[in-house]
């Protein structure tokens, strides 16, 4: 998987530009479906990443890109579930998350927020 470009509001993966948050699950890129997390928006001031979403748990390491400025909240239940499943969880601003993915993508899934 090749990360060609990231800027606020878009990311290019393998030559394809995405203008929405993405989920990378075993090498497949899909749109993040955050509707299930919108119920927590008022509590966090932003739609967080919650356990209610379809999280790609089939991995040894899960990288969460929290946006250009690192503003995406990750709910504690997500962290606890990763620990329960014995999955290494990296929560980083998206530019650093991309660098982590470039260095070691094997057995790694990701959720990348592309704004804030």
Image: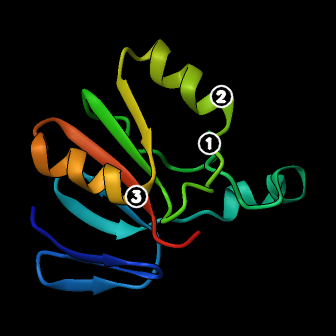
Q: Secondary structure at mark 3?
A: helix
Q: Secondary structure at mark 2?
A: helix
Identify the residue position indicated by label 1 in the image: 74
For residue 65, side relative to residue 33 (left or right): left
- Measuring from the top left, give residue 61's x and y in whole percent: 28, 31
User: In this rendering, is residue 82 above or below 105?
Assistant: above
Checking the image for residue 77, the label placed there is 2
Q: Callout 3: 10 Å neighbours few (<14), some, many (20+)? A: many
Q: Secondary structure at mark 1?
A: loop
Q: Is residue 26 among the parts visible in the rendering?
A: no
| Quadrant of the rendering where the C terminus is positioned | bottom right
Q: Residues within 10 Å of mark 1 (few under 14, many from 20)?
A: some
Q: Which quadrant would residue 12 be assigned to in this image?
A: bottom left
Distance from disc 2 to disc 3, alpha carbons, whole Å, reads 21 Å
- Circles 2 and 3, Cβ within 8 Å, touching? The answer is no
Label 2 Cα crowd, 10 Å radius (few <14 / some 14-19 / many 20+): few
Give the residue pinned by disc 3: 94
Left or right: where 62 falls relative to 77: left
Looking at the image, residue 62 sits to the left or right of residue 75; the answer is left
Nearest to the eye among marks 2 and 3: give it.
3
* First-in-chain label (2 vs 3): 2
Q: CA distance from mark 3 to mark 1?
A: 13 Å
Instruction: Give the residue drawn at x 43%, y 45%.
Output: 92
Q: Where 114 sits versus 81, above or below?
A: below
């Amino acid at each position: 998987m090749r990360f060609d470009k990231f800027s606020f509001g878009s990311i290019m993966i393998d030559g394809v530009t995405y203008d929405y948050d993405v989920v990378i699950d075993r090498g497949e890129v899909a749109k993040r479906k955050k509707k299930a997390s919108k119920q927590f928006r008022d509590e966090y001031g932003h739609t967080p990443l919650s356990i209610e979403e379809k999280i790609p748990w089939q991995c040894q390491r899960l990288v969460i890109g929290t946006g250009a400025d690192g503003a995406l909240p990750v709910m504690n239940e997500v962290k606890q579930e990763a620990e329960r499943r014995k999955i290494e969880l990296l929560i980083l601003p998206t530019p650093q998350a991309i660098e982590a993915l470039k260095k070691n993508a094997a057995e790694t899934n990701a959720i990348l927020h592309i704004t804030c």
